[in-house]
Image (cartoon, helix red, strand yellow):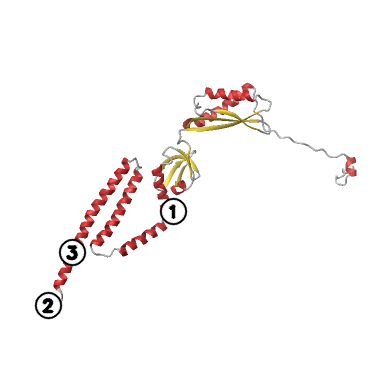
Amino acid sequence: MNDFFDSIGFEHFTQNLSHYGIKIGLALLVVVVGFWLAARISNVGRRALERASVDVTLALFLRNVIYGVLIALLIVQAMGVAGIPTAPFVAALGAAGLAIGLALNGSLSNLAWGVLLILFRPFRVGDYVLVGGVEGTVQSVNLMHTYLVMGDNREAVVPNAKVGGDAIINFNRRGTRRFEIKVGIGYGDDIGKAMETVRELFAADPRILNDPAPGVWTEALGDSSVNLVIRGWTKVADMWETQTSLLRKVKERFDAAGITIPYPQSEIRVVSQPAPAESATNPLVPSPPAAK
């Protein structure tokens, strides 16, 4: 019997089985401990991001990214401990990642810009902005899209790649805005009186800020009027009401003060027909029709 076991290499087989069994056991231990450590590390990272006031959506996304990277490294390490060649697996994993990246090029671009927008916060929920050629109030921002409510209550969903790839104009980030009104007065009117009337309206409206100071200037000598430009600063919430109210008051006060706001004027010249004697001597001028 011993000769039979020796002939089939039983002792060598048992040694190999014991050797590979130990490697597989160590690999399983690495996997179990590694999964626990990966979950702990990713959760610690998420809590640290939340304490740093990072958006909850971004913190959860980064937590999942950290967890996925750690699990991939763990699998490679476990394969190495078990004695399985890892080079083909790493190459296949890299090729799969490249293929997925090329297939999801647009989506990954949106995702990358979403992370940057949430991190750097060029605008917040409630801000009135112009992004990607769309103007509206920010409703929400996620990792793929920015949601805006437009002035007529339409909702716009703008891809984050388009938001980040274009100029971002935030209308109320600074807390104040400047309005501008252009008014024309007649050439025969008193410019100083018109300007003083506008300054009185500035002082009468508490919504118009004193710092920066409002002002009225002569902008241009137009075809039929002297053009004045009126500028003032208000809080963001008061800008539209203040501008429209001031425009109406300017019209009413100018009317009361006898300051005219002229209509556009055009000069028309009428050229009369030449006399018959001239047409007779000038071959280029047609003769009048003969009487019947």
Q: Mark 1 or mark 2: which comes first in sequence?
A: 2
Horizontal side of 57 relative to 83 (left or right) equals right
Residue that mark 1 sits on: 106
Residue that mark 2 sits on: 4
Q: Say whether marks 3 and 2 touch (CB < 8 Å).
A: no
Residue at screen point 43% across, 43% down? 147
Horizontal side of 66 relative to 158 (left or right) equals left
Q: Alpha-carbon distance for marks 3 and 2?
A: 25 Å
Across and down, in percent, residue 222 comes to 66, 33
Give the secondary structure at mark 2: helix
Q: Nearer the viewer, residue 279 or 218?
A: 218
Residue at screen point 32% across, 42% down? 50
Residue at screen point 30% across, 51% down? 67
Horizontal side of 267 relative to 104 (left or right) equals right
How many other residues sit within 10 Å of disc 1, few (<14), some (14-19) or many (≥20)?
Answer: few
Residue at screen point 53% across, 32% down? 179
Amino acid type shown at disc 2: Phe
Q: Mark 3 or mark 2: which comes first in sequence?
A: 2
